[in-house]
Amino acid sequence: MRLRLLSLYPDQMNIYADRGNLTFIRKRCEWRGIGFELTSCGLGEEFDPGGHDLIYMGGGQDRDQKAVAGDLVRVKRGQMFTARDDGAVILAVCGGYQLLGRSYQLEGERIEGLGLAGLETVRESGPRLIGPVAITVDLDGTERTLAGFENHGGRTYLDTGCEPLGRVRSGHGNNGRDGLEGVHDRNLFGTYLHGPLLPKNAWLADHLIGLALEHHHGGPVELEPLPDELESAAHQSALRAAEAG
Ligand code: GLN
């Protein structure tokens, strides 16, 4: 078995060590004897939409987002839609998550997004939404927790009928008002959680690995459990920070 991971704009979209998510997926594949292939795709480059099982984009400052947004829409939009429709898994964090939506409205400037998800982000007046965050997520009939750290000026609003990734237990989430966090639509996942997200939430890493392998190999895959003592400790510590906040 082999998992093919595509990292979009690794040079620009890597805030709060979001690149750690890639290392974590690599290690969890290697520990199980699953082949792992990492391809990067930067400014001006196209990718083969059928050649990747998991597409990843991390967070970035407004400045970096602006630099990649035009490229994303001009050069990669068609490939992103084809990959999504073909069942590739997409994970986007913070700035990357915002670019999944139709637009990111800044003061006097509208950054066009991919429009892969029914959501919009607006930079409103008011403080940045910063701090530890914990959310409750139900992807398969079982409630689980994600814990991490958020720092965003943009407030994201989901269209009616568009499902969040989870519900805020503590922290701000999409906009600090409606109690929703992230977006989830079949194989598409967006979230504000840094930390990095996956090392602190190993269950989500395995969920994504399972979906990605299913995409590549065409059937459900049973993943060998891993000891996860350090990962559980990292999760508990992030959760405690969120609950203390
Ligand atoms: N620049 C975006 C915002 O401030 C995203 C920030 C991030 O990726 N942490 O809303």
Image (cartoon, grey):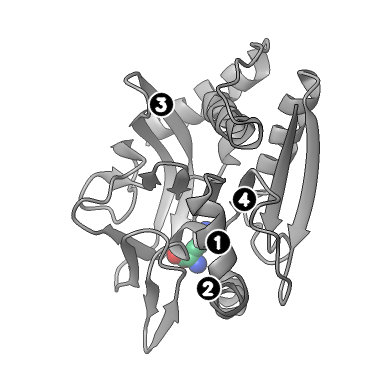
Q: Nearer the viewer, mark 2 or mark 1?
A: 1
* Ligand 1 under 8 Å from disc 3 Cβ: no
The amino acid marked with disc number 1 is: Met
- Disc nearer the start of the sequence (2/1): 2
Distance of label 4 from label 3 (alpha carbons): 23 Å
**10 Å neighbourhood of mark 4: few (<14), some, or many (≥20)?**
many
Indicate which label's residue lies in the foreground, 4 or 3: 4
The residue pinned by badge 2 equals 62
Tell me which label, 1 or 3, sits earlier in the chain. Answer: 1
> Are the residues at dot 1 and dot 4 in contact (C-beta closer than 8 Å)?
yes
Ligand 1 within 8 angstroms of badge 2 C-beta:
yes
Q: Which mark is residue 145?
A: 3
| Front disc: 2 or 4 | 4
* In-image side of 114 versus 27 (left or right): left
Please name whichever residue, 102 or 131, is drawn nearer the observer in this view of the structure. 102
Residue that carries the numbered disc 1 in the rendered image: 80
